[in-house]
Amino acid sequence: YQQRWTVEVFFRWVKQYLNVPTLFGTTENAVYNQLFAAFIAYVLLRWLYDQTKKRTNVSLSFISFVCRFFSGQLPIDWKSGMAAALFEYAQIYGRRMYNFG
């Protein structure tokens, strides 16, 4: 019973924080692919949040950041902080960054 409950808690976390309300596939491979894509998105958003949070004075929780990020309603301080973080990353690792809006 405890193992099953652990699985239930894990999937509740996935649904809440990775924005995966339902799993679209029914095969094992489809479920793994969808969860893997959600984890990649989570890690990238978390990295972007952590890097931007250092550069701004406006306080946002991670959940608020994600909601505003997807709705395009981030404060200007956060947008400029994200741009600075991404350009700094590009300079450190020698990647070319194009202008983004």
Image (spheres, helix red, strand yellow):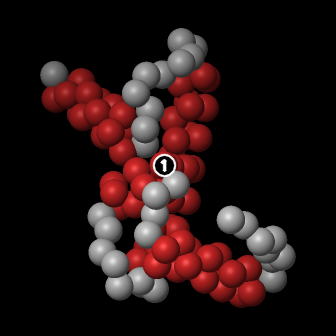
Q: Position of residue 61 (x, y in %)?
A: 30, 64
Give me the residue at 73% from left, 80% from top. Answer: 90
Query: Taking the image as drawn, is residue 38 in sight?
Result: yes
Query: Taking the image as drawn, is residue 3 in sight?
Result: no
Residue 10 or residue 44, whichever sits in front: 44
Q: Position of residue 57 (x, y in %)?
A: 35, 85
User: The C terminus is located in which quarter?
Assistant: bottom right
Residue marked by disc 1: 71
Can you say whether 1 is above or below 62 in the image? Answer: above
Give me the residue at 81% from left, 71% from top. Answer: 98
Q: Secondary structure at mark 1?
A: helix
Can you say whether 57 is above or below 67 in the image? Answer: below
**Amino acid type, callout 1:** Ser
Label 1: few (<14), some (14–19) or many (≥20) C-alpha neighbours in 10 Å: few
How many numbered dots are placed on residues in this image?
1
User: The N terminus is located in which quarter?
Assistant: top left
> Residue furthest toward the left?
1
Residue 60 or residue 29, whichever sits in front: 60
Can you say whether 57 is above or below 47 in the image? Answer: below
Give me the residue at 36% from left, 34% from top. Answer: 15
Give me the residue at 83% from left, 76% from top. Answer: 96
Q: Position of residue 45 (x, y in %)?
A: 50, 59
Q: Position of residue 31 (x, y in %)?
A: 53, 25
Q: Tell whether 23 sits left or right of 7.
A: right
Q: Tell whether 8 sits left or right of 57.
A: left
Can you say whether 18 is above or below 6 in the image? Answer: below
> Residue furthest toward the top?
26
